Image (cartoon, helix red, strand yellow):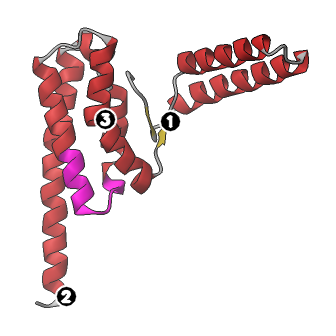
Amino acid sequence: MGCGQVSTITKFTKYKMMKSIGIVVEKYRYIITQMPEKKRKYHLKSIHNFLIHFEELTLDSDREIVFETLNEYLEFISVNTIDSNNECKKLFYEYIRPVGLIYQKKAGFKYLLGPDSIVVLFVLINITLLILNANLYLFIIFSFIGILFIIFSIYKRSGTKVYQIGW
């Protein structure tokens, strides 16, 4: 097998994979346009970011896993309804998180905590400090850090290399 054959095989594999991801893109577009009620709790912003950066995955095995997982997930949500936050979390950890981990390792993605989660975390920290009779300066420092984290989280949400539960 000559070098030209390897190049042709690689080009064919990439063409086939891009054609396959096109199927996922079409399912995503259909859900966004025809099922507007599914814009919340269905992780569609995360999927959008995954689709934008699909070409950054260099290994065919990663691309195949992403394609199969997203295709299966979009099929599932197109015929099913999520009724609770627990179902939302279950689907996130079953479908979105594994894809997100691939993107974290291969495309520089970050998992993003939502501002609401950050607020809860820092309220718990401040309550703990209150119980321990901590110095007032610690309250101020942790509150300031919490505000910075919230601003950072809101800023990062506008980027495309992030994914998040329920987003």
Residue at 15% in and 64% down: 13
- In the image, taking residue 68 as reference, residue 86 lies left or right, namely right
Question: Could you tell me which secondary element the residue under label 2 belongs to?
Answer: helix
Mark 2 nearby-residue class (10 Å; few <14, some 14–19, many ≥20): few
In this rendering, the label closer to the viewer, 2 or 3: 3
Closer to us: 58 or 121: 121
Q: Is residue 64 magenta?
A: yes
Of the residues under marks 1 and 2, which one precedes in the sequence? 2
Question: Which region shows up in magenta?
Answer: 55-67
- Measured as percent of width and height from the top left, residue 131 is found at 76, 11
The Cα–Cα distance between marks 1 and 2, rounded to whole angstroms, is 39 Å
Count every numbered label the image shows and give the total. 3
- Measured as percent of width and height from the top left, residue 63 is found at 24, 54
- In the image, taking residue 103 as reference, residue 88 lies left or right, namely left
Q: Which residue is mark 1?
A: 159
Of the residues under marks 2 and 3, which one precedes in the sequence? 2
Residue at 12% in and 83% down: 5
Q: Which residue is mark 2?
A: 3
Give residue 145's quadrant in the image. top right
The kind of residue on which mark 3 rests is: Ile
The kind of residue on which mark 1 rests is: Gly
Residue at 13% in and 67% down: 12
Q: Is residue 126 above or below residue 145?
A: above
